[in-house]
Image: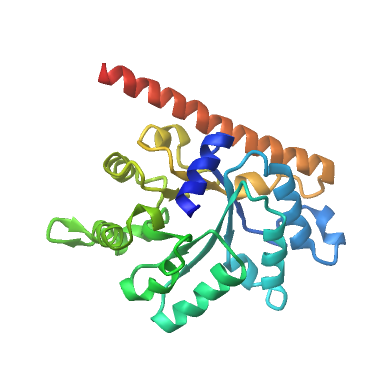
Amino acid sequence: MNYIEKLKYIIKKKKSNLIVGLDPDIEKIPEIFLKYSNPILEFNKSVINASKEIVAGYKFNIAFYEVLMGNSMDIIAKSLSFIPRNCVTICDAKRGDIPNTSEMYAKTYFDNLCFDAITLSPYMGLDSVEPFFKRKNKFAYILALTSNKGSSDFQKIKSGNTYLFEIIVKKYLKMYGTDQTGFIFGANHLSDIKRMTKKNPNLSLLIPGIGAQGNDLRELISNLYNDVFVINSSRSIIYSSRKNITLPEYLKYVKNRSNEFNSTINQYNTSHKKQEKRRQV
């Protein structure tokens, strides 16, 4: 089973398009975890245990682990071991380099750590990501149109009548197809998300920008036209407003936040589909 088949199965079985971002920050995690010799690992374990039956998967932003230095890879590996097989795992590394360097990244994140998918930067060309695509059951989310303020600085530069991000999407889909390739679109780019998902029913988008970044979930769902999208939420689920929260309270908080978020996605998605059916009658 390749990644997209696994993702489709999980979305249908668990009724979930929610990805939780495991972005641990020692200055933000609840104080209860600071008593452990490895507080970040215990924090991740708690988030996973509280949400694993609800979410479609987890995304690890590698920057939050690299900053830990010495035992960062060990924390990633052990955290991954807590995640059940009915969840996808995404390595948010945004890699992309000359082929022999990318091969080392692919060995690290796909062969050694066994992530299901990875985020990649497209800007060094198709050969820079080729080593990742040699792993046939793996998947890559290519940076296309991101949620940060500066996304238009380069991603919306035009070549003729075509934006740079559109050229990137077209080239990568032609080369690798939707079985191995998806794209990152920020939740603030509604018209582009609508156009891409209407045109490509099997195209998986990884969508950041909901939750702490403040974009509107209802508006996002109303512009999605396939079922293989995943919406990432990190800070709004994993960080409580109270740092002195007890462990049982924290587990309940994460579970409730995950449930609320996913239920809202499903509610809006059901409503959107009904509206579309009425329009087609």
Question: Image point 33% across, 44% down: which residue?
Answer: 193
Question: Image point 71% across, 78% down: which residue?
Answer: 70
Q: In this view, does 24 lie above or below 194?
A: below
Question: Which residue appears farthest toward the front when viewing the image?
Answer: 1
For residue 84, side relative to residue 143 (left or right): right
Query: Nearest the camera: 90 or 20?
Result: 90
Residue 116 can be seen, yes or no: yes
Query: Nearest the camera: 70 or 181?
Result: 181
Query: Nearest the camera: 185 or 279?
Result: 279
> Which coloring applies here?
rainbow
Residue 182 can be seen, yes or no: no
Q: Is residue 245 above or below residue 262?
A: below
For residue 39, side relative to residue 136 (left or right): right
Residue 234: where, in percent of width, then height? 59, 50
Q: Is residue 6 above or below residue 38?
A: above
- Residue 174 appears in which quarter of the rendering? bottom left
Residue 35: where, in percent of width, then height? 87, 60
Q: In this view, does 155 lie above or below 233?
A: below
Question: Image point 28% across, 62% down: which residue?
Answer: 168
- Residue 40 appears in which quarter of the rendering? bottom right
Residue 121: where, in percent of width, then height? 40, 67
Question: Which residue appears farthest toward the left when viewing the image?
Answer: 160
